[in-house]
Amino acid sequence: MSLLEIKDLSVSFGDGAKEVKAVQNASFSIDKGETVALVGESGSGKSVTALSVMKLLPYPLARHPSGSITFGGEELINADEARMRDLRGNRIAMIFQEPLTSLNPLHSIEKQISEVLFVHKFMDKAQAHARVIELLELVGLEEAIERLDALPHQFSGGQQQRVMIAMALANEPDLLIADEPTTAVDVTIQAQLLKLLNDLRDKLGMALLLITHDLGVVRKMADRVSIMNGGYIVEQGNVDDVFDNPQNPYTRRLLAAEPKGAPDAADANAPQLMSGENIKVWFPIKQGLMRRTVDHVKAVDGVTLSVRRGHTLGVVGESGSGKSTLARALLRLEYCTGGIVFDGERLQDLGEAAIRPLRKRMQIVFQDPFGSLSPRLSISQIVGEGLKVHGLGGNAEERRTLIAETLKEVGLEVDMMDRYPHEFSGGQRQRISIARALVLKPDFIVMDEPTSALDMSVQAQIVDLLRDLQKRHGLTYLFISHDLKVVRAVSHDIVVMRQGRIVEQGPAGEVFANPRQAYTRALMAAALEMKADDTGVVGT
């Protein structure tokens, strides 16, 4: 008997003409100790299927017109909330796609990990404290042990994801559902986490339902794979069989999708648009009753860089290396010391009122799309907010036309404008974030992991879109990513960061072809290992 068996599962939202059929007649099973991957584009029904197992959908808005979900022989479709509370976090655990949204912003990481241990294992504080330290070491987050009272927003996206994994593994569950577990993680940490999940699966006999758009991860991790499209499972079988000999046209299209090519050549003599000199962002570490500063976390420690007009500067490095903090500092969204110059203006000399007119020329796409979109505003309000703030677009009708055109540019339908963020998949929300930045026609855009939540085919589309927009509008990008394939496809120049400092920089082709630093070579080697898997996939 399979540990988890899903038969003829359908999930719908709403009724009548407004009914959305998210999943239709899906069937698959997972045995104890087995890894099954659920693969498909954003909005294909992967996460909805996983949430159905945990009964975390917004019932009664969501309903199951058909289907059965059995776990260890027990039917879960009609299980009451008390029974599901016993199972969740104990025998079935889940790593969610967007860690910052899933973590409580008001509670320390120790309190959040400990909660699972208190509820299900009835540990006392000392036992839970010891177990929290053990779990953080297990997921490669030793640096957080000295910061157990820190809040989630004080960690990088990759670090937040590892906190989520520690919480999910706390009680050594029988089934772990991992919804894009390596989305926000750089390639070196990705390799560590995948090995960790594999080792735990083998050690505990744990079953793993892996939801991902990263086909290299699927090939490394999964025993069997199910391909979803439009709510249906269109193909399934052993990973090697499906990847080496795909039968469905959609599967073949999905396997062939990958960001390719390089950006158009840029003017090497173009003037500098954005530069930073000796940028430092230090966060104080306070201890004792008087909360005196005893040391600093040097998130960015003396960084000097520049971006020429019409160029893309790619910033790479491991989680916690200071990439996102540096970007926020350059935009004056994070306090820093040092000199920042944008198009000849010294930003450090400007007050908030003086810098506001420049904000429409300097935009940012944040790493966590759901966390940066207001749940109370419709998509048209979110994308159009900047137009209203800066007095652009004329009247309401003209602004709505601009919003519609921008949504089309990022691959969204115009009739989506009056919907709300929770009605979209992770990939669609990321495209909304990009539209919000693009609608102001800025000169400089910081892209903080803009493709991390997107499946391969949409990644390729977004990369093509960004290159096309750059060519047509002369845009300048600071592009932050842990995905070196994407960085290579968009960047003219590269900066490699480690522990708050730049360890290597130069033209993209030169850095990729001949990295000088051992750390850069290690990053490239980890990426090439994943690339070798992807090459095998693409060659089918």
Image (spheres, rainbow, N blue to C red):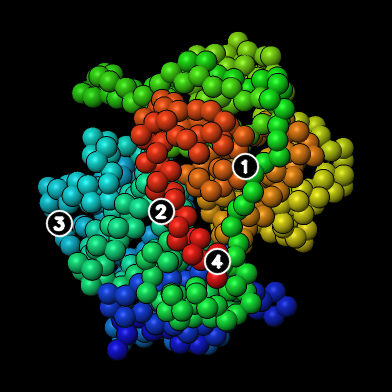
Q: Amino acid at mark 1?
A: Val
Q: Are marks 3 and 1 in contact (CB under 8 Å)?
A: no
What residue lies at 55% left-to-right and 42% top-to-bottom? 487
- Please name whichever residue, 500 or 45, is drawn nearer the observer in this view of the structure: 500
Task: Please give the residue where the numbered disc 2 appears in the rendered image.
Answer: 529
Task: Please give the residue where the numbered disc 3 appears in the rendered image.
Answer: 123
Q: Secondary structure at mark 1?
A: helix
> Which quadrant holds the N terminus?
bottom left
Task: Please give the residue where the numbered disc 4 appears in the rendered image.
Answer: 539
What residue lies at 70% left-to-right and 21% top-to-bottom? 269
What residue lies at 60% left-to-right and 65% top-to-bottom? 256
Dot 4 crowding, Cα within 10 Å, few <14, some 14–19, many 20+? few
* Vertical placement of residue 273 versus 338, above or below: below
* Vertical placement of residue 462 versus 79, above or below: above
* Label placed on residue 180: none
Label 4 – label 3 distance at C-alpha: 51 Å
